[in-house]
Image (spheres, rainbow, N blue to C red):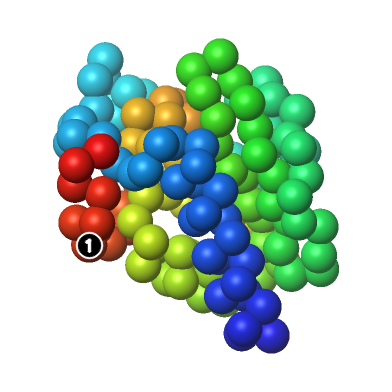
């Protein structure tokens, strides 16, 4: 099962890099005071969470332990994943973070996108911002 989670995490990150054009932005902070207005962390199914940000997810993975889809909103695209267990979520996140990126983490869910996107989503979904490991491979992008 661990191998499956690692493959799913790698697949999510590949999709993230394709969506965001190679990686993180240089914007290290939040603009517009979004951090001051963080709501309680949302809960629910992938569809419930997507509805909170007014998107219809294009489901990419529909398995017992993880459901994952791509959401498109006016400001861009992001990946939304829900998990059956907290442990499964943490294992997936630990594997995915090796590839860089920005993550909004909630109760058994993760939104993955560029830093600006996940910061924006936090204003609607709550959650905690986490950053992946930067290896400098995309420094020129």
Q: In this view, does 1 lie to the left or right of 36?
A: right
Task: Look at the numbered disc 1 and give the secondary structure of its residue.
Answer: loop
**Residue 110, visible in the rendered structure:** no
> Looking at this view, is 83 or 117 the one in front?
117
**Rendered view: 50 above or below 16:** above
Q: Is residue 77 visible?
A: yes
Kindly give the residue lying farthest to the front in the view shown: 140
The picture places residue 41, in percent across and down from the top left corner, at 52, 42
Q: Which of 138 and 1 is in front in this view?
A: 138
Name the residue: 59% across, 20% down. Answer: 73
Residue displayed at 52% across by 54% down = 14
Q: As drawn, is 139 to the left or to the right of 79?
A: left
Instruction: Return the x and y of residue 24 as percentages of the image width and height.
Output: 30, 41
The residue at which mark 1 appears reads as 135
Residue at x-position 42% and y-position 30%? 117
Characterize the local packing of mark 1: few (<14), some (14-19) or many (20 or more) Cα atoms within 10 angstroms: few
Residue 75 is situated, as x and y percent measured from the top left of the image, at 49, 18
Q: In which quarter of the image is the N terminus?
A: bottom right
Q: Quadrant of the C terminus?
A: top left
So how many labels did they put on this image? 1
Q: Residue at x 67, y 21 (%)?
A: 54
Q: Where is residue 89 in the image (x, y as percent from the top left)?
A: 57, 67
Q: Quadrant of residue 37?
A: top left
């Amino acid at each position: 099962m661990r191998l499956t989670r690692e493959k799913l995490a790698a697949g999510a990150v590949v999709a993230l890099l394709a969506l965001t054009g190679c990686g993180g932005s240089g914007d290290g902070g939040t603009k517009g005071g979004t951090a001051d207005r963080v709501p309680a962390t949302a809960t629910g199914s992938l569809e419930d969470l997507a509805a909170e940000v007014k998107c219809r997810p294009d489901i990419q993975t529909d398995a017992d332990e993880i459901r994952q889809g791509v959401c498109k909103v006016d400001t861009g695209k992001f990946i939304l994943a829900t998990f059956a267990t907290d442990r499964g979520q943490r294992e997936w996140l630990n594997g995915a973070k090796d590839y860089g990126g920005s993550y909004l983490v909630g109760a058994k869910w993760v939104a993955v996108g560029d830093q600006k996107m996940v910061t924006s989503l936090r204003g609607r979904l709550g959650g905690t911002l986490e950053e992946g490991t930067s290896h400098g491979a995309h420094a020129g992008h």
